[in-house]
Image (cartoon, coloured by chain):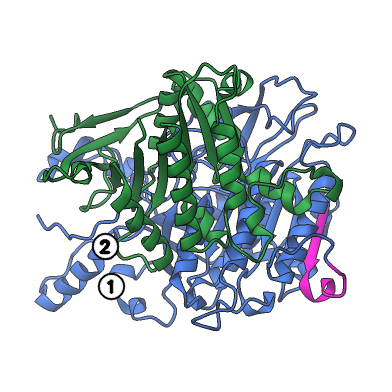
Amino acid sequence: QGKFTLLRDTRTDGSFLVHHFLSFYLRAGCKVCFVALLQSFSHYNIVAQKLGVSLTAAKERGQLVFLEGLKSCLDLLFGEEEEQSGQPSPLQFISESASNLKALFDFVRTSLTPAGSDSWKGPVLLVDDLSVLLSLGATPVAVLDFIHYCRVAVCSQLKGNIVVLVHSNEDSEDEENELVANSLCHHSDLILWVEGLATGFCKDVHGQIKIIKRVSLELTAEQDVVQIYQYKIQDKNVTFFARGLSAAVL
Amino acid sequence: MAVQAVDFAQHGSEDVDSSNGGNPLNVQVEASLLEPFFLLVGGRPKEGFYSVVKIQVGDLSNKKEKIPTILVFTEEDIYGLYSNLLFKYFLAEGVVCGHDLFVASAKEHPDNILKELPAPLLGDTYRNELGEEATAVKPEDFQDSMKIAWRYQNLPKMEASPTTSTKFGHYYDVSKTMSPELFQSIKWHSFYLPEELSSQPKMKTCNMNSAYARLLQSIQRIIYQEGFDGSDPQKKQKNILRIGIQSLGSMLWGDDICSSDTPEDIHSLTKFLYVLRGLLRKSLSACIITVPAHLIQNKAIMERVTNLSDMVVGLESFIGSERETNPLYKDYHGLVHVHQIPRLNSLICDVSDTKDLAFRLKRKLFTIERLHLPPDLSDTVSRASKQDLAESAKLLSSGCGAMAIGKKHLDF
């Protein structure tokens, strides 16, 4: 409970982890607030169905609060003035000159604060992906502030979990993005770092995943536990195996 | 590497398709051979059926997919020749398939662009054309068995170019232009920036470059008016809108990311792409954009653009570069770098076997092929030339961030 997990990908696409966590938490009966900035609802829905979860059903029973960033942005830009009722759009920072993500944070907080009749287990915030906020004009500090506020609200107060995806790259020239990614690394309880293989493209092994449990944060003088596996993504699941032991080789 | 036709059913997005009741409709879709990955997927709307543009690499699959994607071509070729050619191919395929077109440009009037589309090779003429150009050896010639390399006897012949037996899309003859009669049946819209500057943008510009804002407004208006987003049940659109935007990010669009290291507004282009992505996702449309990436000083912008696009391909032509004389590349005119492939509606993306692609412009055809080393047939192999080839070979796998980048050159 109260854990912050960072999904980080380098030279490959780590979004399969997002799909996994989404279906995992929904199956576990948690209330999920999913800030989906990069893809449309039906994309996640189709993949989730392959993984055995129906997002539409979850939305209907109130277990899933889905913020579809693309749609929200369009409503903001092309929507009529009268349509926008008292509630400001969560992505309001795009149209304002001050880049502060307060509206987005308010949206997250109101979605995850339990209503009286809710019987869900702990709340979960899922973000895919944070790097998009930088592309839309938010400053790195604003993004980090947003995450900080979310941690206070979701992890500390509501005892929920947060899972966030960022892209990063060692020789990336996008300094703002690297700043956000590195800063989040320092504050995470668990880091799942997905990388493409250093030796190049391979059909049977799609990449490697480094699982870092930040035990050092607990101040017991222990070092972080690092485990490395390789993986292959298939249509409905992902298989993990020890390095060098891919099924194609054995 | 063959282009695969995708045979799939589409039942529209939730927004678009309400009256259809979500009935899966089977439509045969054809993809053009000339762009083995993507883009020129044409569809023929039969009555009552949705035809869908699909971008797919690899195997035949029967998925229910949605169409819209953003494609970004990076004009890494300095003279813009080849990216312009592919841009025109995309539009030409749209004309032949009967899709609606939307062409936006800041430097060339869309009417002129459309006058220069390559002519399609229809019927049997294309087989003859290919026959002249083909250098592939017929399988019958290799009946005698291999004596030394007998292990390779049973391996499938490597296909440098897609085979002619699979029928995808259409071939085009770059030496001829499309005849005006073909345009009669389609509807096309244009956006020429110098003409649009006089009107005021009605939408909130959101600190975006005003040229981009106008373009977005124009696209949104067409999508809404022509019913591509399904919002108006009376205007049920069964067709696809193909959007082509030329040289986005260049100075002609009023953006200074190509001219300055510290541009005034680094977010305009990415905001534009994000909003465009939203528009495409909720409508029946596909888009190709060419970007002069070699001019953009701030590489962070290109990284963000790559993340926001479904598919990113870079063209690197050999004109004027040292690679023109490199023996590795003597048959080709340039390289194709794939930076991103679409991963829509599934956990995996279909990846082809190889990442090393090169293109060449023959007299009439433009082809994209697997890059392979020419056979080393020289009697005296000097160390210098071997080193050269090894260096070039190291550069082979340096593309495609979607899977992995090989930094270490493994030499067996």
Q: Is residue B240 above or below residue B208?
A: above
Q: Is residue B272 above or below residue B19?
A: below
Q: Residue at 67% across / 45% down in the picture?
A: A72
Q: Quadrant of the N terminus of chain B?
A: top left
What secondary structure is found at the residue carrying circle 2?
loop
Task: Tell whether label 1 touches label 2 (CB within 8 Å).
Answer: yes
Q: Amino acid at mark 1?
A: Pro
> Residue B97 at x, y = what percent?
71, 44
Closer to the camera in the image, A63 or B9: A63
Q: Residue at 66% across / 21% down in the picture?
A: B24
**Are dots 2 and 1 on a single chain?**
yes
Numbered range of the magenta stretch: B188-200
Which residue lies under the disc numbered 2? B374
Closer to the camera in the image, B226 or B61: B226
Asked where in the image residue A87 lies, by quadrant, the reply is top right
Which residue lies under the disc numbered 1? B327
Residue found at the very far right of the displayed protein: B234
Q: Residue at 64% across / 58% down in the picture?
A: A94
Cα–Cα span, label 2 and label 1:
8 Å
Q: Is residue B136 above or below residue B289?
A: above
Q: Colour of chain B?
A: blue
Q: Is residue B103 left or right of residue B270?
A: right
Q: Amino acid at mark 2?
A: Pro
Label the green chain with its letter: A
> Residue B139 at x, y = what percent?
34, 41
Q: Give me the disc on residue B238.
A: none
